[in-house]
Image: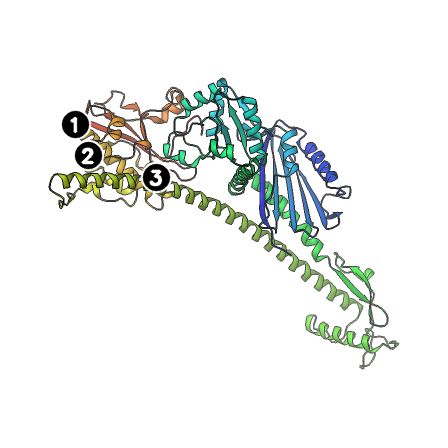
Amino acid sequence: MSTLELAYRSFLRVDRQPDLLKHIDEQMHSWLRRKKWDGKGLVPGEIATVADGVTGVVIRESHPDGSQGVRFVFDQDQGKGRWLTQVTAYRQQRHDTGWIWVDLSTDQRQRQVRTPALVKNLVGVLDARDGIGPLTDEPVIVRQGGVEELLERVQDPQRRGLLFIAGSTPDLSLEEWRTHVGKILAQTAGLAAGYVLDPLATKRFAELAGDDYRAVPWTIRTYHPGVDLDDPDDGRRHRFLGTDTIIEGSTDSLANLLGHRAKMLSLEVPIDEAAMRVHRRFRDTYDDIVFDTLVAAPTRELDDTGKPDTIKKAAPSVLSPAETDTITPPTPTPVDETVPDHTPTVSAAQADILSALGEVMQQVLGRETWGREEVIELGNHADAHLRLDTSAARQRLHEVADQRDKRDAELADLRTQLEEALLEAAVAEESRALVEQEARHLRGELAKAGNPDTVWQPPEDPRDRIPTGFSDILRWFKHLPHVEFTGDDSATEDIDRVDDTGKFAITCWEQLCALDDYARAKLEGKISCGVKGYLEETPGGYRTTGPKKHASNESNTTRTTPKFAKPRTLPVPVEVDPAEEVLMAAHFRIGKRGMYSPRMHYYDDVDGTGKVYVGYIGKHFDNTMT
């Protein structure tokens, strides 16, 4: 049998759809009719032939709380490659929520898989969504008043698919632009959401999202999941389809390009654990159905001449005396009550069989003489052993499937880490190039001054050491005379559980050293600005760090909402504030690994006590988007 690989996946969420499974049944049977497949023979728990070269299985489950699920599986091999279509729907009664999951696997590795018509139909008839945002079969026009809601969808941590946004100006018809964008996004139905901003909404979106995340007019920008507006470097991940490309390129080619991107991401992003539990139940049930069909192989019986005669399906139950006929064996020994003295004449073939059976009796039951009851006992032994073997094989099949799911999850995590590493490498390379330009300029200035051979030797400084983890940083605060840590050591040390490479620790130490030199520069009268201004224009001879990883404040909602403001209200000495705590809204982004984004929150009191107080180093606090 050919090896199948997952080629397409769509995962849709739905709310308040009490007839979800009814809709799925209707759509599946409509889909079967369009393909001219016969779905009348589909019976839950059995494999049915729905067309030449096509089998189908439907599996249903229901629970005492009213939750229900269904899975359809169609295995197609009609001479054009093998295709496995799997459609699963589940509705949770308690929360009135549900989801639809469509997988398409094939052995045709080089073939471009287009969005199935079934998925387009499901999106058209159901109020499907991805995270908090709806999924539609056409791009949605967004006016100025809807920009804030759209921005929430862009940042939605539950979003797993791409989000496409096209900007505009008053120069062209908005409806014509939306139609053209719709053609380019045709292959993303059920995988991504598309939006077209009107001119005022385009300006408003740029104001709120910032230059690194704005949607440029007459372009289509792709926003991946995990958007972090506080991290300008993250903007590199979200690519543009430029105006020239849109004008000069083939619409079909562009549609295939964006469709491919949406499909690849959908294959890579893990399914949440609640849905995976449902999937594993359906998967194991399907495997059992297929397994039982395979092991229930036909067996051949012998006719009176000892030749194969009729073919029967292997009996699933234990043998019993009432169900079994006995061939009485010949014997050269004296007749006893087990072997009657009126033994009929048997053929040579039958004699060979009986002789072999006698050997088996001796080996298995230890019987030299045997009869009907012993044959039945032997059959029971064989049946029990067969059941034991099939049970072990079934269990092993489930274990292998679980291992594959685990491997897929680990692979997805590694892929995420690789993407983040590549992004950081790109940022580091840009920084390196700028530093090299600066060094080249300074060497030129030295040459002009008549000192081309001057070599700079760095002074010994304990701050130049590279930390191996956050435990080092906690010990090294003593080397930062203008920075004081007032936070919880355990929250900081917990970062090392995730940061197994030490990358976060190196970045954080660089930021702390920059804060220390900021305070020194201000106390020495070199600057009069705050941290933001210092990082943007650092005086010569003072340490700095990337200004794009710094945020001077939190959003107004975060600062004024008690449940968000309270965790950010952190300890300071009484000489800083009589309450011995202040709101530390200013912070540094240390890094990112998947959904884990550690932060360092601080309070600048250089104008007061001459120090910067760091009240927290740890995982990202909750905000409106988490």
Is the residue marked by circle 2 packed among few (<14), some (14-19), or many (20+) residues within 10 Å? Answer: some
Q: Position of residue 278 (x, y in %)?
A: 60, 41
Residue at which label 2 appears: 542
Compared to 344, does 581 lie above or below?
above
Q: Which mark is residue 227?
A: none
Q: Toward the viewer: 182 or 337?
A: 182
SS at mark 1 in the image? loop
The residue positioned 32% from the left and 39% from the top of the image is 430
Q: Toward the viewer: 56 or 199?
A: 199
* The residue positioned farthest toward the front in the image shown: 248
Inspect the image, locate mark 2, and give the three-letter code of the amino acid beneath it.
Tyr
Is the residue marked by circle 1 packed among few (<14), some (14-19), or many (20+) residues within 10 Å? Answer: few
Q: CA distance from mark 1 to mark 3?
A: 29 Å
Q: Earlier in the sequence, mark 1 or mark 3?
A: 3
In the image, 16: left or right of 160?
right
1 and 2 marks in contact (CB < 8 Å): yes
* The residue positioned farthest toward the left in the image shown: 450
